[in-house]
């Protein structure tokens, strides 16, 4: 059985858009490449044709995987999130107890993580340490630089 994954509404829309592009423009480009290679003569000795057919197989595999991901994807209803504790999609303001630095992160599905915009994967060490905790809780997190203690300052959605 495939693993159910959770996404924001925007994340699902990005996946649907990617699938649409693969099924329309992507397939059209591959069909064109196969037709051009076929026009070059004997298929038994045509490396370009073989390469185009192989690319088609990879493309169809990608479409199949994306359809499977979408079939097992669930949208997280942000309006029903409990802000008394850290959950997926929570926006969490934390303070490093050693140096006093404050950071704000949103915990998102792995496929939507983007550190530049403050979105960290729910599977990251920091997110794993924060899940289920409340404002005022202190958590010790193991990161590549060692163990760091954070205090949860604020939780919102």
Image (tube, rainbow, N blue to C red):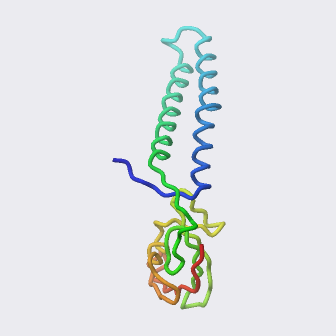
Q: How many marks?
A: 0
The answer to which of 147 and 80 lies nearer the viewer is: 80
User: Where the C terminus falls, by quadrant?
Assistant: bottom right
Q: Is residue 75 above or below residue 153?
A: above
Q: Position of residue 64 (x, y in %)?
A: 47, 37
Q: Position of residue 54 (x, y in %)?
A: 50, 27
**Left or right: 21, with 83 as reference point:** right
Identified at 62% across, 22% down, the residue is: 33
Q: Is residue 110 above or below residue 46?
A: below
Identified at 64% across, 27% down, the residue is: 29
Farthest residue in the front direction?
Answer: 80
Q: Position of residue 69 (x, y in %)?
A: 47, 46
Q: Position of residue 7 (x, y in %)?
A: 53, 57
The quadrant in which residue 100 appears is bottom right
**Left or right: 57, with 154 as reference point:** left
Q: Is residue 124 above or below residue 47?
A: below
């Amino acid at each position: 059985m495939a693993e159910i994954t959770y996404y924001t509404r925007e994340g699902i829309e990005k996946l649907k858009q990617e699938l649409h592009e693969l099924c329309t423009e992507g397939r059209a480009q591959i069909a064109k490449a196969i037709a051009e290679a076929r026009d070059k003569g004997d298929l038994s000795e045509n490396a370009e044709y073989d390469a185009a057919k192989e690319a088609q197989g990879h493309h169809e595999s990608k479409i199949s995987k994306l359809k499977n991901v979408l079939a097992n994807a669930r949208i997280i209803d942000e309006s029903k999130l409990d802000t008394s504790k850290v959950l997926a999609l929570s926006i969490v303001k934390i303070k490093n107890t050693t140096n006093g630095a404050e950071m704000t992160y949103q915990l998102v599905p792995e496929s939507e993580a983007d550190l530049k915009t403050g979105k960290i994967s729910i599977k990251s060490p920091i997110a794993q340490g924060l899940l289920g905790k409340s404002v005022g809780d202190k958590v010790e997190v193991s990161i590549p630089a060692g163990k760091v203690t954070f205090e949860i300052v604020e939780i919102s959605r």
